[in-house]
Image: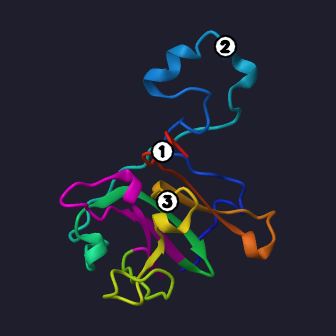
């Protein structure tokens, strides 16, 4: 099955107006006096599609790094005719889950229904697993923050070595937000 890339068609999918509108949720009121029709996004429409109930989970906990908390934030993009699902997991610290510890994992599919978690030699897990499907963890960045709310996207203007980008929100004790 061939999937249409939303970036190639110059369409970007947003689930709300957070990254589009100059205001978000309850904070909108503080911008009300400074926002006018000239600086609002143009020709954008947010559509909600009807959810579908499936008889079994599309993806489930399989590994120790997924056991504590499986995050709700996911991103799916097509790369080389394969769907890549990037999902967030929160390994716990003695039963406590922290955004600063979140990791980003990868699952792949040809049909969007059956997902396989590839074994990659990027980030091992506790000397127990040399190959994992973890593609990002806090130790991968200067500020040692997790990939909370992560999203991967393709930058069509970037050189091949920088084609795919990651954006996320992270927090640690010494920084308010990164």
Helix, strand or loop at label 3? It is loop
> What residue is disc 1 on?
174
Q: Residue at x 51, y 74 (%)?
A: 84
How many C-alpha atoms fall within 10 Å of the one at disc 1: few (<14), some, or many (≥20)?
few
What percent of the width, then of the height, locates residue 38? 76, 21
Q: Distance between the residues labelled 1 and 2?
A: 32 Å
Q: Residue at x 59, y 77 (%)?
A: 2
Q: Give the range drawn in magenta.
A: 83-112
The outermost residue toward the top is 33
Query: Contact (CB < 8 A) between labels 1 and 2?
Result: no
Q: Residue at x 51, y 42 (%)?
A: 177
Q: How far apart are marks 3 and 2 (CA)?
A: 36 Å
What percent of the width, then of the height, locates residue 148? 44, 53
Q: Which of marks 1 and 3 is in front?
A: 1
In this view, the residue in front, 14 or 103, is: 103
What percent of the width, then of the height, locates residue 13? 57, 51
Helix, strand or loop at label 1? It is loop
Please tell me which of labels 1 and 3 falls first in the chain. 3
What percent of the width, then of the height, locates residue 158? 79, 65
> What residue is disc 2 on?
34
Helix, strand or loop at label 2? It is loop
What's the colour scheme? rainbow
In this view, the residue in front, 171 or 60, is: 171
In this view, the residue in front, 70 or 78, is: 70
Does 37 sit left or right of 93 as displayed?
right
Identify the mark at residue 144; answer none if there is no mark.
Answer: 3
In the rendered view, tell whether residue 101 sits above or below residue 163: above
């Amino acid at each position: 099955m061939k999937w249409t890339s939303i970036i190639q068609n110059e369409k970007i999918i947003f689930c709300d107006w957070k990254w589009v509108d100059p205001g978000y949720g309850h904070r909108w009121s503080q911008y009300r006096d400074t926002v006018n029709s000239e600086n609002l996004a143009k020709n954008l429409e947010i559509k909600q599609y009807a959810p579908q109930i499936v008889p079994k989970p599309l993806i489930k906990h399989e590994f120790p790094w997924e056991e504590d908390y499986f995050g709700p934030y996911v991103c799916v993009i097509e790369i080389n005719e394969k769907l890549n699902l990037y999902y967030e997991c929160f390994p716990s610290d003695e039963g406590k889950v922290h955004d600063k510890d979140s990791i980003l994992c990868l699952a792949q599919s040809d049909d969007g229904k059956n997902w396989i978690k590839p074994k990659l030699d990027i980030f091992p897990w506790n000397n127990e697993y040399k190959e994992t499907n973890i593609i990002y963890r806090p130790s991968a960045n200067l500020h040692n923050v997790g990939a909370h709310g992560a999203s991967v996207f393709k930058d069509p203007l970037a050189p091949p070595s920088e084609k795919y980008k990651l954006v996320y929100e992270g927090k640690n004790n010494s920084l308010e937000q990164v």
